[in-house]
């Protein structure tokens, strides 16, 4: 007889966490192998180079899906915490849906959606992942330019 601890860790039944069950199906259908971490979030990897992202699902009268990730802030970004937070604030104020912040020295980018039974989760998920990756690229890229250029802002250097 095999050791019961060696059996795969199956996700809970879909009716226990309906939105998470739907999201697991969407992520699998896109060819990615998701896993559930210790916090109950869905972890998955996208892109080249590989990027670890997460989906947090909150069931209730208005189910909410949060897609988020975190990135180490390297030497290309000034060490000034105030400048980093101001840049995050500028980006968040310019964006729709996505929020940008810093926690424990890492860049955090999130996007939240209220989800209904009629929501096309596959399309919403793909668009959200693309949005997050574009925001991360723009935030880091804005430091390379030597000036801040938040999404939708215009060059006013003349």
Image: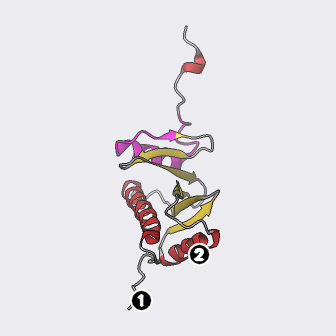
The tag on residue 156 is 1
Could you classify mark 2 by the number of other residues whose Cα lies within 10 Å: few (under 14), some (14-19), or many (20 or more)?
A: few
Q: Quadrant of residue 85?
A: bottom right
Seen as rendered, the residue at the extreme top is: 1
Tell me the residue at 52%/60% (across/down): 75
Q: Is residue 122 above or below residue 42?
A: below
Could you classify mark 1 by the number of other residues whose Cα lies within 10 Å: few (under 14), some (14-19), or many (20 or more)?
A: few
Q: Which residue is labeled 2 in the image? A: 86
Which image quarter is the N terminus in? top right
Tell me the residue at 56%/52% (across/down): 56
Which image quarter is the C terminus in? bottom left
In the rendered image, residue 30 lying in the magenta stretch gets the answer yes
From the viewer's side, name the closer residue of 152 and 107. 107
Q: Dot 2 lies on which element? A: helix
- Residue 82 is situated, as x and y percent measured from the top left of the image, at 64, 72
In the rendered image, residue 108 lying in the magenta stretch gets the answer no
Q: Dot 1 lies on which element? A: loop
The magenta-colored residue range is 11-35
């Amino acid at each position: 007889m095999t050791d019961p601890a060696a059996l795969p860790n199956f996700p809970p039944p879909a009716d226990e966490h309906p939105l998470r069950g739907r999201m697991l199906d969407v992520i699998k259908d896109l060819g990615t192998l998701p896993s559930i971490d210790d916090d109950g979030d869905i972890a998955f990897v996208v892109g080249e180079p590989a990027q670890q992202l997460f989906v947090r699902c909150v069931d209730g009268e208005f189910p909410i899906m949060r897609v988020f990730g975190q990135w180490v802030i390297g030497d290309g970004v000034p060490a000034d915490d105030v400048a980093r937070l101001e840049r995050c604030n500028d980006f968040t104020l310019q964006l729709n849906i996505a929020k940008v912040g810093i926690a424990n020295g890492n860049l955090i980018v999130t996007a939240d959606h209220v989800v209904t039974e009629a929501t096309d989760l596959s399309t919403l998920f793909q668009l959200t992942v693309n949005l997050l990756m574009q925001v991360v690229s723009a935030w880091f890229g804005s430091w390379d330019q030597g000036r801040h250029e938040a999404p939708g802002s215009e060059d006013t250097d003349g």
